[in-house]
Image: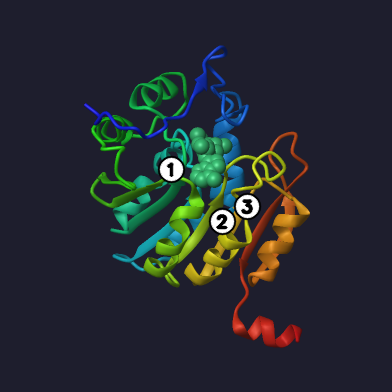
């Protein structure tokens, strides 16, 4: 059983069980029609993960950071697709994610009874998530022995300092989720972009569905080269980026 805590869990409107909606942000977590395709297109392909996993030396590790864990769908869809490949190459995946309002264990189960994830790790994930102590600042557990999941609880602004110190130059890819900047500007801050710069490994990439000018300028000011690329479904465009190396910077000066 999960510990009883004063942590504020997400408040979810289940009127449409296929499209659970956050009452706090008045937006859906995922759409049961197309949600998986959107994750694959935007976050997995947007960061070229398959190609990068294939090119990694056996036995190495790869670290992903995400803003907004929600139902964990991005991680579960990633594992549905690539767990076998990661296993085959003995690659350790470290997945660090920020979440202000975690789903209660019951809501997490409910979200996945109507969701499309067939990830082999789903039962293990639900069991470990359900047994977590939400009074702590973070939840941390392993999945399938090679995935280290770390959910940093609370507003992201309270976690970025520690995160930047601990993961300096270690993040290989970012999934910038977390609702649109116009509805949730508190998440898309200069402090986040600065933390992304500090923690970026030389091959660090990012992907997000938003093409907000403020976000793109913030990422560019922090040292990322950003470009628009075709979005998923009805979304015309999305943003992809990568850390500019010193040589890129010198060339543009
Ligand atoms: C679009 S949902 C994430 C969807 C997730 N990928 C999924 O499949 O369920 C965005 C998440 O960001 C979290 N969030 C929003 N603002 C935040 C903040 N300032 N700090 C930490 N988490 C935040 C919300 O609580 C929500 O769970």
Residue at (69% x, 63% y) in the render = 218
Q: Viewed as shown, does residue 220 lie left or right of 159?
A: right
Observer-nearest residue: 87 or 125?
Answer: 125
> Mark 1 against mark 2, which lies toward the viewer?
1
Label 1 packing within 10 angstroms: few (<14), some (14-19), many (20+): some
Q: Quadrant of the C terminus?
A: bottom right
Residue at (29% x, 65% y) in the render = 59
Q: Is residue 200 visible?
A: no
What is the CA distance from the residue labelled 1 to the residue labelled 3?
Answer: 21 Å
Q: Answer yes or no: do the residues labelled 1 and 2 have beta carbons within 8 Å? A: no
Count of labels in the image: 3
Which image quadrant is residue 159 in? Answer: bottom left
Q: Quadrant of the N terminus?
A: top left
**Which residue does the numbered mark 1 point to in the structure image?**
75
Kind of element beneath mark 2: helix
Observer-nearest residue: 159 or 213?
Answer: 159
**Which residue does the numbered mark 2 point to in the structure image?**
47
> Which numbered disc flags the more N-terminal residue, 1 or 2?
2
């Amino acid at each position: 059983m999960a510990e009883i805590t004063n942590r504020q869990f997400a408040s979810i409107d289940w009127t449409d069980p296929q499209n659970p909606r956050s009452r706090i942000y008045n937006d859906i977590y995922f759409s049961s029609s197309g949600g998986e395709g959107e994750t694959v297109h935007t976050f997995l392909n947007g960061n070229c993960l398959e190609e990068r996993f294939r090119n990694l030396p056996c036995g190495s590790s790869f670290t992903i950071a995400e803003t907004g864990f929600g139902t964990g769908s991005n991680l579960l869809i990633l594992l549905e697709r690539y767990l076998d490949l990661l296993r085959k190459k003995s690659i350790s995946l470290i997945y660090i994610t920020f979440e202000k309002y975690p789903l209660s264990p019951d809501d997490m189960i409910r979200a996945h009874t109507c969701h499309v994830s067939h990830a082999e790790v789903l039962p293990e994930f639900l069991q470990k998530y359900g047994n977590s102590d939400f009074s702590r600042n973070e939840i941390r557990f392993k999945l399938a022995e090679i995935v280290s999941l770390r959910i940093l609880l609370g507003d992201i602004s309270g976690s970025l300092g520690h995160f930047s110190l601990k993961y300096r130059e270690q993040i290989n890819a970012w999934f910038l989720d977390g609702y649109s900047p116009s509805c949730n500007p508190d998440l898309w801050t200069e402090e986040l972009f600065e933390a992304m710069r500090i923690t970026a490994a030389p091959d660090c990439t990012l992907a997000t569905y938003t093409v907000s000018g403020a976000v793109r300028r913030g990422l560019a000011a922090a040292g990322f080269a950003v470009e628009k690329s075709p979005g998923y479904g009805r979304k015309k465009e999305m943003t992809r980026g990568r850390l500019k190396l010193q040589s890129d910077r010198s060339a543009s000066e």
